[in-house]
């Protein structure tokens, strides 16, 4: 039995969920589908002895990384992109399963085949996540809520897996909604509900707000979407640079981005603009490590690994410096990404001018089971 988001009332489930007040008046109907603990759930489905047990998909070697964790494992604090050694310490009974990306890709193709029966406007974000624009769906179904229900039912019947869905009038809110009632949840946010839905969310839930940015916002008295909405566009631009405009629109539940079927991810990056310029090696290292963790988390989620790690620094006078290193083997684990990023940062010291932005990017992306871990010997080749 799936759980239903509290934003959806009895009348809404059968009514118009794609048009109304605000931005949604144009009638867009967007669904964000997110499979529940996808890799781990596939393993539990295929091996009944794993059901109900804490499972981690990933490498077990010293430099291994958790690509996915079952909900049982998550209760112990185990998360994707976490070092396997740390995950085992947090959960001694954790069962490690080697990833089978060929199987995950096949199941993903099966799921996307279901999507295609309803719409051609599908924007895949990873093997287990996608946006769908069902405004003019193939089945002629009047509400996106019903489309989401049918898709989730088909996924469960044909794959034995559960999916959570967020339904709304733009991508930003649909993605937030899909996470609102996981696992196996359905959350619908109508246009007239969008601003209130955003207002009560902690800013840390917003896509693009990492721990560093969340801490900066907290210091500015910005704790919720409502707090963010009270800030002017100029103030947010001053504090957060180009991200300020995004935060300004997000706080108002506005997102005009279309669903893009041709979207192909070429890199995975994370960067932060700082409230105060950073000068010390300690502060820069902390920021770099956090960005590396964000990149590793996204890499694990998407089943990607990359051969090139790069860092970007922007000084107080707006000069921008980038450095990159291409490795002999793809990496995706946080330790490897951090090691390369730190090595790229080291020659740039001492910092005579303040740093106002720092970012880490993983590119030259590929996919496959063999790319989840890299040996210390392979990594060392990049530094010879």
Image (spheres, helix red, strand yellow):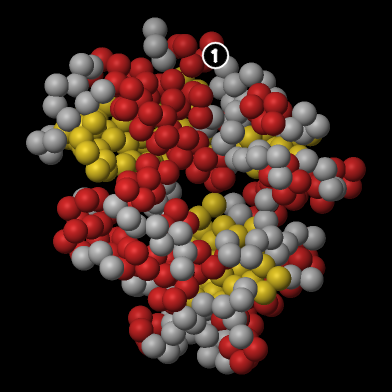
Is residue 222 left or right of 51 when viewed as pictured? left
Q: Identify the residue at horizontal 64%, vertical 83% (top origin).
A: 146
x%, y% of residue 344? 32, 21
Q: Which image quadrant is residue 87 in?
A: top right
Q: Identify the residue at horizontal 42%, vertical 29% (top origin).
A: 289
The reply to whether residue 355 is visible in this rendering is yes
Q: Identify the residue at horizontal 22%, vertical 26% (top origin).
A: 279
44 versus 295 height, above or below? below
Q: Identify the residue at horizontal 56%, vertical 22% (top origin).
A: 374
Quadrant of the frame with the C terminus: top left
What secondary structure is marked by label 1? helix
Q: Return the residue found at the far right.
A: 49
**Number of marks:** 1
123 versus 105 height, above or below? below
Q: Return the residue found at the far top.
A: 384
Is residue 71 left or right of 175 when viewed as pictured? right
Residue tagged 1: 376
**How many C-alpha atoms fall within 10 Å of the one at disc 1: few (<14), some, or many (≥20)?**
few
Q: Which image quadrant is residue 114 in?
A: bottom right
- Work out whether residue 117 or residue 354 is closer to the camera in this orientation and state it: 354
Quadrant of the frame with the N terminus: bottom right
- Work out whether residue 238 or residue 40 is closer to the camera in this orientation and state it: 238
Is residue 81 left or right of 246 when viewed as pictured? right
x%, y% of residue 238? 17, 53
């Amino acid at each position: 039995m799936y759980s239903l988001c509290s934003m959806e009332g009895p009348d809404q489930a059968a009514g118009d969920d794609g048009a109304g007040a605000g931005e949604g008046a144009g009638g867009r109907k967007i669904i964000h589908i997110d499979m529940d603990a996808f890799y781990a759930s596939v393993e539990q489905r295929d091996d009944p002895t794993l059901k109900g047990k804490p499972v981690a998909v990933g490498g077990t070697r010293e430099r291994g990384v958790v690509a996915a964790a079952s909900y049982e494992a998550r209760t112990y604090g185990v998360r994707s992109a976490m070092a396997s050694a740390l995950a085992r310490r947090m959960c001694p009974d954790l069962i490690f399963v080697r990833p089978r990306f060929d199987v995950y890709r096949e199941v993903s193709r099966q799921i996307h085949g279901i999507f295609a029966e309803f719409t051609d406007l599908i924007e895949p974000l990873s093997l287990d996540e996608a946006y769908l624009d069902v405004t003019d769906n193939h089945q002629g179904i009047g509400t996106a809520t019903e489309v989401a229900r049918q898709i989730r039912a088909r996924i469960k019947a044909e794959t034995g897996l559960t999916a959570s869905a967020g339904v709304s009038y733009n991508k930003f809110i649909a993605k937030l909604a899909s996470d609102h009632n996981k696992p196996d949840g359905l959350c619908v946010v109508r246009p007239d509900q969008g601003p209130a839905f955003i207002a009560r969310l902690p800013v840390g839930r917003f896509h693009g707000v990492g721990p560093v940015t969340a801490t900066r916002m907290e210091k500015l008295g910005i704790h919720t979407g409502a707090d963010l909405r009270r800030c002017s566009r100029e103030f947010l631009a001053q504090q957060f640079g180009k991200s300020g405009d995004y935060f300004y629109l997000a706080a108002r539940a506005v997102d005009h981005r279309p669903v893009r079927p041709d979207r192909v991810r070429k890199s995975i990056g994370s960067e932060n603009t700082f409230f105060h310029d950073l000068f010390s090696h300690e502060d820069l290292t902390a920021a770099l490590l956090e960005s590396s963790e964000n990149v590793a988390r996204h890499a694990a989620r998407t089943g990607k690994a990359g051969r090139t790690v790069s860092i970007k620094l922007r000084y107080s006078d707006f000069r921008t410096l980038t450095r990159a290193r291409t490795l002999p083997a793809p990496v995706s684990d946080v330790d490897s990404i951090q090691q390369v990023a730190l090595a790229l940062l080291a020659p740039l010291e001492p910092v005579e001018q303040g740093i106002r932005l720092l970012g880490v990017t993983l590119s030259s992306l590929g996919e496959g089971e063999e790319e989840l871990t890299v040996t210390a010997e392979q990594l060392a080749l990049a530094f010879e």
